[in-house]
Image (spheres, rainbow, N blue to C red):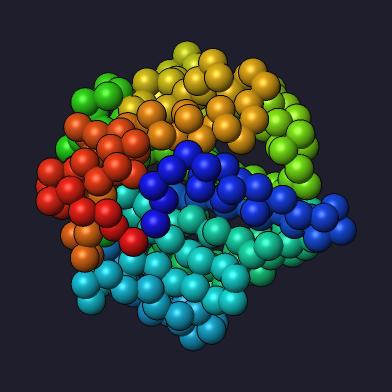
Amino acid sequence: MITTKEQIVQYFESGAKDKKDFKIGIEHEKFLFDKKNNKRIDYVKIKKMFSALIEFGWNPILEKENIIGLNKGGKNITLEPGNQIELSGDKLTHIHEACAESQDYLFELKQVTSKLDIKIVSAGFDPISKLNEIPNNPKQRYELMSKDMPLGGELSLDMMYRTCGTQLNIDYNSEKDFEKKFKIVNSIVPISIALFANSSIVEKKNSNYLSYRSKVWQNTSRGGLPKLFFEELNFEKYAEFIMNFPILFIQDNGDYISGKKYIFKDFMGGKINEIKNRLLI
């Protein structure tokens, strides 16, 4: 239970590792289309695909009896709002292991998707589908997010249902090392967008953007990079940023509650009316 800024700082401090123990982790998302009609696949087909992947040693992740993902060892396959799938990879030592992990995953995925007439598409933005054509799924928090997020950014639903991305997780050995890496990584975002700008097509037409995905994220609730991220951001400043950041949702006994009226400091102080001002563990 977190109730003070010092606890958040201590959490960051506990993440520091010796250089010899450094790991990397990679997450990447894929679109899935039906080969027969070039439509995004629905949850019925997702369930068939997940069932087939279980034969490769994956274990189901359930939410109220609905399968919403898979795990195997330190890896997870998760389901995004528009039935994009994401591999959250294991903690790995170097990029060659990350490449091998990705190849193994794609090999298994292709064995399954080829039998189900599913196409795998790696792109930053769905180049074909209109927003209202994309099926959803029963993952509970997405219903809440679909209602609340457009209030803070006009393209939030495009982000949720029509984008895919890749994320990199890296370690640090001290607060100073964290400051340096955090600033550098955020500063090279424009370069990475330019290098991997594979999202220029929207609804089968040229959008006149090399990276329409980037435009979407700049007009998404909670999207973009705060000015603070380009400054000398130590653990205490980051803790203060977190404490004053709006809450997306609150999970209470398996139910999801909108957090749009609150910031994280309210949660820490037991000031959430919808959960009777309780502190949740």
Q: Judge by depth and name the residue closer to the eye, 20 or 50.
A: 20
Query: Residue 53: image x %, image y %?
Result: 47, 77
- Image position of 120 with respect to 203: above or below: below
Quadrant containing the N terminus is bottom left
User: Which residue appears at 34% of the width and 44% of the height?
Assistant: 268
Query: Residue 200: image x %, image y %?
Result: 50, 25
- Image position of 91 with respect to 257: above or below: below
Q: Judge by depth and name the residue closer to the eye, 218 or 170.
A: 170
Residue sticking out furthest to the right: 20
- Image position of 45 with respect to 226: above or below: below
User: Which residue appears at 37% of the width and 21% of the height?
Assistant: 219
Q: In the picture provided, is 108 more to the left or to the right than 243?
A: right
Where is residue 181, by image quadrant? top right
- Image position of 71 with respect to 89: above or below: below
Query: Residue 163: image x %, image y %?
Result: 42, 38
Q: In the picture provided, is 169 more to the left or to the right than 118?
A: right
User: Which residue appears at 58% of the width and 23% of the height?
Assistant: 229
